[in-house]
Amino acid sequence: MNLVKRDRKHLWHPYTQEKTAPLPVPIVRAKGVWLETEDGRKILDGISSWWVNIHGHSHPFLNEAIARQAAELEHTIFAGFTHRPAIELAERLVDVLPAGLTRVFYSDNGSTAVEVALKMAYQYWQNCGEERKTFVALENAYHGDTFGAMAASDKSSFTKPFQDLLCRVLRADGDLEKLESLFRKHEGEIAAIIIEPMLQGAGGMIIWQAEFVKGVRELCDKYNVLMIADEVLTGFGRTGKMFACEHAEISPDMICLSKALTAGYLPFGATVATEDIYGAFLSDDRAKTFFHGHSYTANPLACAVAIASLKLFDSEKSLERVSAISEKFRSFAKTIGRMPMVENARTIGAVAAFDIVSSETGYLATIGQRLYLEFLDRGILLRPLGNVLYFMPPYSISDDEIDRVFGEISEVLNSLEI
C-alpha cells in the first residue's frame, strides 16, 4: 500500500479541510532545496517547509551534530537538571541576540515560546506587586495556535471558533500616535505589547518600517510597558539581519524564537528575557516561581542542532547569502510589480511577497489554492496565504534555482484569469 493510502486511513493534517483538500504529497527524502516524492518527482521547497529550513535539507554538518549528540545524551528532564548542549546554546544565543537579553527559557515551538512570554509578562507584574491584566497586539497579528497566542493574534478564520474562550487583547495599528493614546488611556494596566518586528507573516507578509518598531520601544520605555518581540519567523537572518529588531537598533524585554532556531530539524522554542524580568521571579516565596515547563524542555538533540546551525552562519556566511538573495528579490519585485494582476510587490531579506488582484482577499481566497496546485504541477512548493503569494526559500538556494522559480511565477501570473 502506498503512503497516501496509508495516510488516509489514520492521519489528520494541520490547516486542512480534509473533505475537500487535494491528497497529500508523499515525501520520502530531501536534499538542499529539493523535496523528493514517493514516485520520484522533485519539488523545490519555496517556503522553507513552513518557514523553518534555512541551510537546506539534510545538511551533512547538521546531520552529524544530531547523530553525535544522540550517541551521548538524547534527553533528560530539565527541572533540577542541566546539560552541556543547553548551556552552550544559551551562551551562543546571548552572544548574538540584541543587548540585554540574557535569560533563556526553552520550550517546544513558536506558539509555546509566545505563550511563555505572555505568562512571564503577566506574572512579572504580579511578582512586582502590580496587577496588570491587559495586553496590546497589532492588527493582522498572528502569534500561534495555543490560547494565549491566539488571543494575541488578530481575529481571523484561525481564531474564530475559539473567540469566546480568549482573553481580551487591545488592538493597535501602525500609527504611533494612536498607540501612544492607547498606552496613555490604559496607563498602569498594560502588562506588555507583542509585535512581529519588521514582518508580519501569516497576517499577509506585511512589512513594517524600522521607525515604527523603534517607536514602539520608545513608547514602552515612556509608559513602563514590557515589549515582546515575536521573532519566531523573523529570527536567524530571514529579514536580512540576524534578528529583525536590529533593523530598528532596539532590544525588546523578551524575544520569542523557534522555526529556524534548529534550522528546520526539530521542534524547539526559546523565550529570552532580561535580567530585570528574571530577577522578579527570584524569591524565598516559592509561589513566585515561574510554573511553566514541557517534557522536552531543552531537548539535547534540538540544542545540538541549534548550536550547529549557529556555527554554519559563520562558516557558510549565511547573512551574506541572504543579502545576495535580497538583491535578486528586489530586482524581480520591480519587474513583477508592473503586471496588472500584481499589487504591492514587496521584499525584505530572503522574503518576497505579492498581492494577487482577486475578487476574494484574505486567507480563504480560492485563488491561493489554485496557485498552490499550479505551482506543484510545475515542481515548486509555494503555499499562498489566500491572495498573497510569497517566496521564502532556504538560504542555500542557488541563483539558478531562484531564477527558475521567478520564471515560473511570471508564466503562471501571465496566464492567470482573475
Image (tube, rainbow, N blue to C red):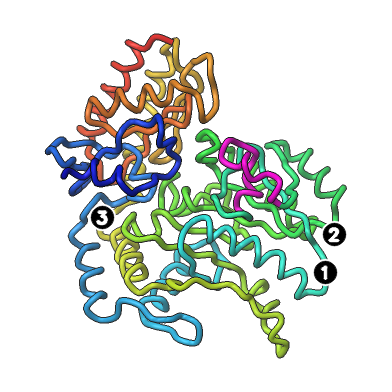
Residue 192 at x, y = what percent? 71, 57
Q: Is residue 342 above or below residue 381?
A: above
Element assignment for label 2: loop
User: Which stretch did the figure color magenta?
Assistant: 148-166
Q: In which quadrant is the C terminus drawn?
A: top left
Q: Residue at x 68, y 37 (%)?
A: 174
Q: Is residue 53 part of the magenta span, yes or no?
A: no
Label 3 amino acid? Glu
CA–CA distance in space, label 2 to label 1: 9 Å
Q: Which residue is mark 3?
A: 316
Q: Is residue 31 visible?
A: no
Q: Is residue 316 above or below residue 75?
A: above
Q: Residue furthest bottom?
A: 284
CA–CA distance in space, label 2 to label 3: 47 Å
Q: Residue at x 16, y 45 (%)?
A: 1
In this picture, residue 154 sits left or right of residue 230? right
Residue 330 at x, y = what percent? 39, 29
In this picture, residue 330 sits left or right of residue 224? left
First along the sequence among labels 1 and 3: 1
Q: Which residue is mark 2?
A: 188
In this picture, residue 214 sits left or right of residue 317? right
Q: Residue at x 63, y 57 (%)?
A: 228
Q: Is residue 162 part of the magenta span, yes or no?
A: yes
First along the sequence among labels 2 and 3: 2
- Check whether the beta carbons of the residues at disc 2 and disc 3 lie within 8 A of each other: no
Q: Categorize mark 2 by other alpha carbons within 10 Å: few (<14), some (14-19), many (20+).
A: some
Element assignment for label 1: loop
- Check whether the beta carbons of the residues at disc 2 and disc 1 lie within 8 A of each other: yes
Q: Which residue is mark 1?
A: 130
Q: Categorize mark 1 by other alpha carbons within 10 Å: few (<14), some (14-19), many (20+).
A: some
Residue 234 at x, y = what percent? 47, 48
Q: In terms of depth relative to the viewer, which is nearer, 133 or 315?
A: 133
